[in-house]
Image (cartoon, rainbow, N blue to C red):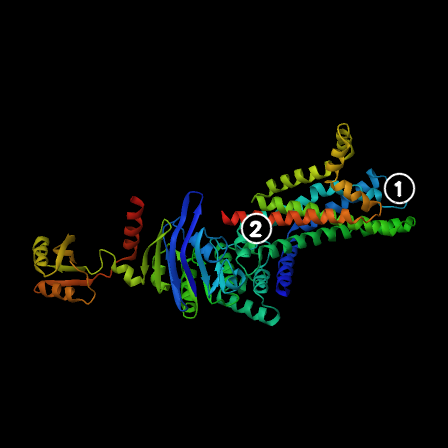
């Protein structure tokens, strides 16, 4: 078991080092921070709201992640397959799930780092007023879990193809579907037919499950939702990879 | 160390590998020959556990590759075709990763990396990104990765592909040296490498083993093997031919060249032998003429290779 953990750590370390040795990491972080700032202050009306909270920050996250997270995740397996390092990795004494978890954890940590770098917002809001920091913490936790879910889906689509662009597009479409399922214009439309249908569809939405976190409510159902999206996607990634190898 | 039993791999209706069996022991270097698309790489991928066989079994050091993959993979060093390496890392970073994933840490890792770097002559590019390396260096980087944990089993898919003649020579020497203590399989389509590095060779064609033996045994299958080539001056071609036919055991005589009063001819015996009796008989038969050259042919691998693999594709 300890060697399994060591393998996951070694693979994650390599993956993380890979991000920072290319411009991907820096471009991503800068864009993420710029977008966060712009939407929070300019579009979200941080000041106009007249309340000490980060609602105007978190409300945009499902939409940022829609494009940014697949950009991080698209290379995970597509690149390994294109360059041929997948053959190297899977003939080393590691199991496929150690490789999958290792690579996923590395990217998730990276997204966590980018999210963590928005800390000046927390300082600002604390300086300007006295917000409920518990709510903010819950927001960050929810955002991190949601990022993980987007990432796991991107990981899955990345395993499908050796073309990063194709992987990106499929990931965006899948994630968009999971957002729209709980997006008011869509739910309102569905509500004309059936309320139970709305509930069913909306229960698959990132937005629905992220709402609670934004309000500071830690509902175990929401946590389980995100974790199961991650678990299911990573499991499917494993199945896809095995399918490729079996030819 | 490596045991392959009735290995089969189907890609859809195509039989990429069709019932391959062989074994490689410690101290053996097995050359894996075959035309492109014969199933060499597919076989190697199954041996190293990258793809599962449709049928058959691979055991490495007594561990079944599909039942105890981790134990089996620990014993193997593998250089895949085209020598892939993580392009976003430096050579050192890549080798450190390879050592770590093989369970080498701290000083053991340092020693292992240094040893591999030295053996593969990578000092000058140690801090260079893999992406910027020339093909030869990238190849050696991946090769270094395969020997980093000093494995008892090495599987090398075209280890000399893309190297310059000097590098090829170095790699062959390295394989021969390491082959004394390890079990090595390497694939190639360069026949001279078989002589340079192998203790045994297998020729595979369309997924089947068509020849298996030491380089000398394979050469002996050549039509040329056992023939005597001689160059004699001061005689006409037909006169020499007539004399050679009189030699006991001659099957066929061909005149290869006749120029300036010199004849280059080749005599084929009915039953090839390597003790030189036939060559001596020829030598005695042509006494009296000036013999400029006379030698016993060993047979040529490329001829054997062509005969075996061509005849099979024509069927």
Quarter of the rendering containing residue B243: bottom left
Query: Which residue is at the front of the view, A76 or B50?
Result: B50
Task: Please identify the quadrant where the C terminus of chain B is shown.
Answer: top left
Disc 2/disc 1 C-alpha distance (Å): 45 Å
Percent position of residue B297, x then y: 22, 61
Tell me which label, 2 or 1, sits earlier in the chain.
Answer: 1
Quarter of the rendering containing residue B107: bottom right
Q: Left or right? Give the position of A191 relative to B109.
A: right
Q: Bin the neighbour count of mark 2 within 10 Å (Cα to Cα): few under 14, some 14-19, many 20 and up.
A: many
Q: Left or right? Give the position of A200 relative to B274.
A: right
Q: Left or right? Give the position of B240 relative to B208.
A: left
Percent position of residue B159, x then y: 44, 58
Residue at (71% x, 39% y) in the render: A178
- Label 1 belongs to which residue? A47
Numbered disc 1: secondary structure: loop
Q: Is residue A182 visible?
A: no
Q: Left or right? Give the position of A53 relative to B313.
A: right
Percent position of residue B21, x then y: 38, 57
Q: Name the chain letter of the residue that bears numbered label 1.
A: A
Q: Is residue B114 visible?
A: yes
Residue at (76% x, 36% y) in the render: A199
Establish if B201 lies above or below A115.
below
* Callout 2 touching callout 1 (CB < 8 Å): no
Numbered disc 2: secondary structure: helix
Establish if B305 lies above or below B24.
above
Q: Kindly give the residue lying farthest to the top in the view shown.
A: A192
- Label 2 belongs to which residue? A80
Percent position of residue B11, x then y: 45, 45
């Amino acid at each position: 078991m300890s060697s399994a953990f060591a393998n996951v750590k070694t693979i994650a370390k390599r993956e993380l080092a890979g991000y920072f040795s290319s411009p991907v990491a820096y471009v991503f972080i800068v864009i993420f921070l710029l977008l966060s700032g712009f939407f929070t202050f300019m579009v979200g009306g941080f000041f106009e709201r007249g309340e000490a909270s980060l609602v105007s920050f978190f409300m945009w996250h499902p939409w940022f992640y829609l494009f940014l997270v697949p950009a991080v995740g698209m290379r995970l397996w597509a690149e390994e397959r294109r360059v041929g390092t997948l053959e190297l990795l899977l003939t080393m004494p590691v199991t496929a799930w150690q490789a999958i978890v290792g690579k996923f954890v590395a990217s998730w940590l990276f997204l966590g780092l980018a999210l963590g770098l928005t800390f000046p917002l927390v300082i600002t809001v604390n300086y300007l007023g006295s917000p409920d920091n518990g709510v903010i913490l819950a927001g960050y936790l929810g955002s991190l879990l949601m990022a993980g879910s987007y990432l796991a889906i991107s990981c899955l689509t990345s395993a499908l193809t050796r073309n990063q662009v194709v992987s990106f597009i499929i990931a965006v479409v899948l994630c968009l579907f999971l957002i729209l399922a709980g997006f008011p214009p869509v739910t309102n439309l569905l509500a004309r037919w059936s309320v139970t249908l709305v509930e069913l569809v909306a229960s698959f939405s990132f937005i629905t499950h992220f709402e609670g976190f934004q309000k500071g409510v830690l509902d175990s159902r929401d946590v389980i939702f995100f974790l199961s999206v991650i678990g299911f996607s990573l499991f499917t990634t494993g199945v896809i990879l095995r399918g490729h190898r079996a030819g | 160390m490596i045991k392959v039993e009735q290995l089969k791999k189907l890609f859809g209706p195509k039989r990429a590998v069709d019932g391959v069996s062989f074994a490689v022991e410690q101290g053996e270097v097995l050359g894996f020959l075959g035309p492109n698309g014969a199933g060499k790489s597919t076989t190697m991928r199954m041996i190293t556990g990258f793809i599962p066989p449709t049928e058959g079994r691979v055991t490495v050091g007594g561990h079944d590759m599909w039942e105890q993959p981790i134990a089996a993979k620990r014993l193997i060093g593998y250089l895949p075709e085209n020598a892939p390496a993580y392009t976003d890392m430096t050579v050192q970073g890549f080798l450190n990763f390879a050592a770590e994933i093989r369970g080498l840490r701290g000083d053991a890792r340092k020693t292992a990396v240094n040893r591999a770097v030295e053996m593969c002559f990578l000092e000058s590019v140690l801090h260079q990104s893999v992406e910027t390396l020339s093909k030869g260096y990238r190849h050696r980087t991946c090769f270094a990765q395969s020997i980093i944990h000093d494995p008892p089993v090495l599987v090398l898919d075209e280890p000399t592909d893309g190297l310059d003649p000097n590098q090829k020579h170095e790699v062959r020497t390295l394989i021969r040296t390491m082959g004394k203590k390890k079990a090595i399989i390497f694939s190639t389509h360069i026949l001279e490498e078989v002589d340079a590095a192998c203790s045994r060779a297998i020729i595979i064609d369309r997924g089947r083993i068509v020849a298996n033996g030491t380089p000398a045994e394979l050469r002996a299958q050549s039509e040329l093997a056992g023939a005597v080539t001689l160059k004699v001056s001061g005689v006409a071609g037909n006169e020499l031919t007539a004399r050679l036919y009189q030699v006991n055991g001659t099957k066929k005589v061909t005149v290869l060249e006749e120029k300036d009063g010199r004849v280059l001819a080749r005599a084929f015996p009915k039953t090839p032998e390597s003790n030189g009796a036939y060559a001596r008989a020829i030598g005695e038969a042509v006494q009296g003429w000036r013999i400029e050259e006379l030698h016993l042919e060993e047979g040529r691998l490329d001829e054997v290779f062509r005969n075996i693999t061509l005849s099979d594709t024509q069927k």
